[in-house]
Amino acid sequence: AFDMTQKPPKPSEHPKQVVILMRHGDRTPVREKFGELDLSHLAPKWRSLLPTEAEQAELDSVRVEREEGTGSNSYASFVGEGHLGQLTSLGFDQCRRAGQQLKARYPEARIRAFSTDFPRTIHTASCVLLGFGASEPPAVSVAAPERQTLLPNYDGRCRRYA
């Protein structure tokens, strides 16, 4: 998540564009079993870390625009099911604060958000937009798998890179 302890470079007076790449905020594990290690008994704890109903309602208020297209997500095994691989309340707060910091740093800026097609990354982008505090947050844009550039070989077509 956004590291607010590091001092950012001094901004120019009138930047034309600022690009910020972020990973998702704090999340639950993407699976309950790691080889021989079975952590499924921790599922109730992980569920308790998920966003509250109020936080989830805020996330749901941000529009998501998915581009039409073909292809599949070659990273599907990292998505997680149910409570697995989801943004936590801590992650929600981390990303909202990142949006607030961006707004403080660039108060006149317009903001756009792009995400891979994972619930946790879409929610991360949504939280940043919510923290930025635009009167009407823009949509989170999700590219079609064959045009995804935020993760390499997203659709798995390149066998050499797979």
Image (spheres, rainbow, N blue to C red):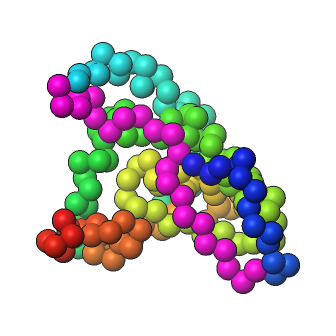
- Main SS type for the magenta part? loop
Residue at image position (72%, 83%) is: 16
Instruction: Name above or below for residue 131 compared with residue 18.
Output: above
| Residue 16 to residue 117: above or below | below
Which residue, as the protein is rendered here, is positioned at the far bottom? 16
Taking the image as shown, residue 23 lies to the left or right of residue 34, namely right
Q: Residue furthest right?
A: 13
Q: Quadrant of residue 83?
A: top left
Q: Camera-side residue: 150 or 120?
A: 150
Q: Identify the residue at image location x=60%, y=66%.
A: 20
The magenta stretch spans which residues? 15-36
Q: Position of residue 27 (x, y in %)?
A: 46, 38
Q: Residue at x 41, y 68 (%)?
A: 150
Is residue 17 in the magenta section?
Answer: yes
Q: Is residue 130 visible?
A: no
Quick check: 110 left or right of 73?
right
**Quick check: can you spot residue 87?**
yes
Q: Position of residue 2 (x, y in %)?
A: 62, 51
